[in-house]
Amino acid sequence: MKGLLGRLFRRKAPDGLSTPPLIALAGVSRAFDDGAIVALESVDLAVHAGECVAILGPSGSGKSSIVNLLSGIDRPTGGRVLWNGRWIKSRRAWARLRRREIGIVFQEFNLLPTLTARENVEIALMGRGIAVAERRDLAAAALVRVGLGHRVKHLPYALSGGERQRVAIARAIVNAPRLLLADEPTGNLDSANADIVADLLFNLQRDGGMTLVLVTHDDDLAERCQRCVRMRDGKIVDNGHARGRLRLVEGPPMPSEPAMAAIDQATPDVADIVPPSATAAPLTEIAPPIAEATAAIARVAAAFREPAE
Ligand SMILES: Nc1ncnc2c1ncn2[C@@H]1O[C@H](COP(=O)(O)OP(=O)(O)OP(=O)(O)O)[C@@H](O)[C@H]1O
Ligand SMILES: [Mg+2]
């Protein structure tokens, strides 16, 4: 727990001039249908550790394509994707990065319907050799961080849209990733919940020293980032550097060692967090058929399995 909290609170000074970008696209293209559709064309983008970058652009301009390449979910048809200056080529290397260094939040939440909030977060910790009890505690602590300590045993259907997205954020940050990617994270939310989720993302980015790449249609949301990258027709038309890549909003200082120990101490056990009334619904009441859920879980488990050497 200590190690995880340490990583969550650690601040990294962005030093774009002397260190390679945390993640970069170098001359990246992505075509579909044998080149008939060009989603991205010769895109150069460097994101340095600690940056908070918005990606803006009309529908179809290539924003999600960029997020899919930055996370290694998709592969470019031309150019290179570099992590810390290193060209990442293999699926295995990308899978490892996603498990340890990259968290992703999608517009549609993507929670498994028959798993509780905590189990949905625990999924991100599978395949890392973490003991079950520690996994549960880490997942519960992540839910506490997003303000859902009282909802750990709830199933997604019993949560509001904003709460579901906060579970998805907890799942994305439970590994204390260095890079947090969010693709229209407020797109399915009403304005009140959108504000809560946006505040949460910016606070996590600031307090944890994470690097945040946020895709949005919302100019006001983008304005809250330190840099706005604008896209059109698969190209970056403004890389946002004019706004000052190193212009960082100063957050509170990193807690001292004793303060960290106190935070650790104060992080409640699951048993303390869950009120007796917050038990999950019996299996028989769960709406989606169990078979469908089992298949979904198997698919997720397969995705988290270590690829063979
Ligand atoms: N798997 C795919 N097969 C074929 N074309 C694709 C595929 N994925 C994306 N595209 C095309 O690539 C282009 C860019 O898509 P992308 O999803 O990146 O846009 P976007 O900027 O995220 O749009 P939106 O704001 O609507 O989410 C679009 O023309 C889209 O139809
Ligand atoms: Mg998109």
Image (cartoon, rainbow, N blue to C red):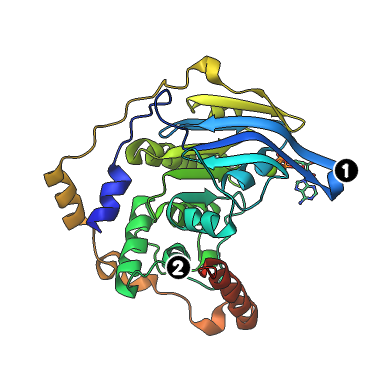
Nearest the viewer among 109 and 226 is: 226
Mark 1 nearby-residue class (10 Å; few <14, some 14–19, many ≥20): few
Q: Tell me the element at label 1.
A: loop
Can see residue 297?
yes
Above or below, 193 relative to 43: below
For marks 2 and 1, give the one nearer the viewer.
Answer: 1
Is 100 displayed left or right of 60 in the figure?
A: left
Q: Split into 4 quadrants, where in the image is the N terminus?
A: bottom left
Mark 2 nearby-residue class (10 Å; few <14, some 14–19, many ≥20): many
Residue at the image point whose x is 56% and y is 25% from the top: 228
Above or below, 276 relative to 142: below
Task: Name the outermost residue toward the front.
Answer: 309
- Number of numbered callouts drawn: 2
Nearest the viewer among 26 and 301 is: 26
Residue at the image point whose x is 48% and y is 53% from the top: 97
Residue at the image point whose x is 16% and y is 40% from the top: 256
- Pinpoint residue 132: horizontal percent, then vertical percent: 34, 74
Is 268 displayed left or right of 238 in the figure?
A: left
- Where on the image, by quarter, is ligand 1? top right
Q: Which label sits on residue 238?
A: none
Distance in Å between CA atoms under marks 2 and 1: 45 Å
- Pinpoint residue 98: horizontal percent, then vertical percent: 50, 54
- Pinpoint residue 149: horizontal percent, then vertical percent: 34, 59
- Per the image, the residue denoted by label 2 is 154
Q: Tell me the element at label 2.
A: loop
- Per the image, the residue denoted by label 1 is 36
Mark 2 or mark 1: whose residue is earlier in sequence: 1
- Pinpoint residue 246: horizontal percent, then vertical percent: 42, 21
Q: Which of the 4 quarters of the picture holds residue 278?
A: bottom left
Amino acid at circle 1: Ala
Amino acid at circle 2: His
